[in-house]
Image: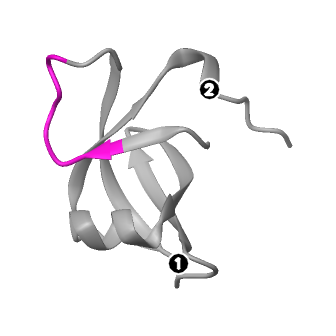
Amino acid sequence: ITDVSISLDLMPKSSILNQLQARVVAISKPVKGYQFVSFDLATKTMTARLTAHSVAHLALKPEQLCYVCFKTPRVLPLRK
């Protein structure tokens, strides 16, 4: 998914209404300023491309709890 925001806390006063608690499961090495971060969301795994700056700013690490926030039109179905 692109166009997601990651937060360490819920954002009750935000226009982004879809805020799902998730656990970081994997973080790729930086490539051209971006990193892929995989999250467990209940029974599904989601991977998002974040800037390396954002990963460092949030100090994301495996097993960390956070919130994956997105607007509904940006969710794309998984293609098999």
Nearest to viewer (mark 2 / mark 1): 2
Q: Verify CB contact (< 8 Å) between mark 2 and mark 1.
A: no
Residue, x 63% and y 79% (percent of image)?
Answer: 32
**Residue 18 badge:** none
Amino acid of disc 2:
Arg
Amino acid of disc 1:
Ser
The residue singled out by tag 1 in the image is 28
**Above or below: residue 2 compared with residue 50:** above
Residue, x 83% and y 39% (percent of image)?
Answer: 79
Q: Which residues are magenta?
A: 6-13
Q: Earlier in the sequence, mark 2 or mark 1?
A: 1
What main secondary structure does the magenta stretch of the protein show?
A: loop
- Residue 48 pos. (x, y %): 54, 52
Q: Is residue 44 left or right of residue 55?
A: right
- Residue 76 pos. (x, y %): 70, 30
Q: Work out whether residue 52 can be spotted.
A: yes
Residue, x 61% and y 43% (percent of image)?
Answer: 2
Which image quarter is the C terminus in? top right
**Above or below: residue 27 compared with residue 76:** below
Seen from the viewer's position, the closer of residues 11 and 62 is 11
Q: Which scheme is used to colour this image of the protein?
A: one colour
The residue singled out by tag 2 in the image is 74
Q: Secondary structure at mark 2?
A: helix
Residue, x 38% and y 70% (percent of image)?
Answer: 53
Counting every numbered tag in the picture gives: 2
**Above or below: residue 77 compared with residue 44:** above
Seen from the viewer's position, the closer of residues 74 and 15 is 15
